Image (tube, grey):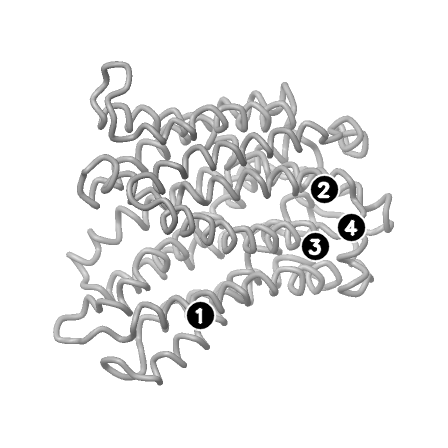
Amino acid sequence: MVKKLPIWGKIIYGVGAGGFSLVDRVLITWLYYYYITSPMEGVDALMAPLVFSFIMFFGRVVDAVADPVIARFSDNYSSRWGRRIPFMALSGILYVAVFIALFYPVVEGKSIWNAFYLLILLSFYFFLFTAYVCPYLALLPELARTNRDRVDLSTFKAVFSLLGVGIALIGGGVLIGILGFHGMIWAMGGMGLLMLYLPAVIREKDYSEAKPATLGLMDAIKTTLKNKAFLIFMGGNFAFWFGFNIVTLNIVLYVTSLLGRGEEETSLFLGIAFGVALLMFPLINILAKKLGLKVMTMVSLVFFSILLPLLFFLGQPVLGLEPLHFGLIIMGLTGIPLAGIFILPDAIVAAVSDLEEKLSGQRREAMYFGTNGLLLKLNLGLSTVVSGALLQFFGDPLGIQLTGPVAGLFSLIGLAVFAFYPEKSVMAFQRKD
């Protein structure tokens, strides 16, 4: 009989998400800036923006393809340390090492060698990111076998993810002032590395009874796609994130173009949304256990379907409110359903992966998270195209204003799809202890 994961185990599991959220947010925030404008005094920009964009796109393709591949190897792996921790332990230090190396180009100024260097290292970065995150997510349903415990793990993961992002966004500029640019990169990498390795303290085999799977890659993908509950979840999740990605891509434009504020005030709007989400985590945790994952997900999607279209009115006086105040209120209210989206999807994937034992007689949690990750990464690329098309065809500000209603429409589609999610059937396969 395996042990029940104690509260300290749930907490340090969540800390791991803070590690990769911190490192990845620093990379997203500073890498483009570093290569295009170069913050190092006396050093020219390292490459043209379009070159950087193509290299980043290629890295995202590697990231997407890596998901099912890593998932298959993790599901089928066997060792005395378990199926997940070995992948996390090996990839964690390499992931941080490549992250730091990305900020040390081979030559000063523009050069084809810098382009090749960035292409190779970004590909490794995204591959190693997946090599850690996919097994990490798959560990969740193995460590927690009941709905209550899975909601707890998802909540701690969400809390530390948000803290990691906060440290990256707020601490980056502060550390540059104290340690210099490269000093900031090393400090962030060190903090991220420590957080990545705390979950390794958990003795995986003490809390998991799962045995290695035996299916090959293509058979594993085919069997996963036979899971009706998983397909419904993916359809609803894909639709929502398609719209919400469009919104996140335009946050800076909402602040600068529609509200006429400075770029630096973007942090204020994000901080309010994240702050409200953080405060809502305990309530979402309690309600998800009492009302179920389906009800709370649908409530979150209803909120988004109502709130996101209101972004169309940013910059205009609404109900006698100043445009700035109206914008802050909308961002604050958005934090309420955002808390649900941070917590609920991982718990749902964990639940539907239980059905795999009926389909193949095996436990293949990583393939479920990997397949979901693959589609969400393709989603990011497609939603970016739609966002650009809105601005291209309708111009500024109408193209930016329309992103809100479009995102709201996709949230509504996600709600309609998720209404068919068979939660009772899924929960029938879950342990009650």
Q: The residue tagged with tag 4: helix, strand or loop?
A: loop
Image side of residue 303 versus residue 351, left or right: left
The disc labelled 1 sits on which kind of residue? Leu
Residue assigned mark 3: 367
Residue assigned mark 1: 122
**Pointer 1 or 2: first along the chain:** 1
- Give the x, y percent position of residue 152: 57, 33
Residue farthest toward the left in the current orientation of the protein: 42
CB-based contact (under 8 Å), mark 4 and mark 2: no
Residue 339 has which mark? Answer: none
Residue at x-position 33% and y-position 42%: 251
Residue 163, by quadrant, is top left
Residue at x-position 26% and y-position 41%: 266
CB-based contact (under 8 Å), mark 1 and mark 4: no
Cα separation between marks 1 and 4: 32 Å
Residue 121, by quadrant, is bottom left
The disc labelled 4 sits on which kind of residue? Arg
Cα separation between marks 3 and 2: 11 Å
**Pointer 3 or 2: first along the chain:** 2
Residue assigned mark 4: 363
Q: Looking at the rendering, in which quadrant would you find the N terminus?
A: top right
Q: The residue tagged with tag 2: helix, strand or loop?
A: helix
Cα separation between marks 3 and 4: 10 Å
Q: Looking at the rendering, in which quadrant would you find the C terminus?
A: top right
Cα separation between marks 3 and 1: 23 Å
Residue assigned mark 2: 230
**Pointer 3 or 1: first along the chain:** 1
Q: The residue tagged with tag 3: helix, strand or loop?
A: helix
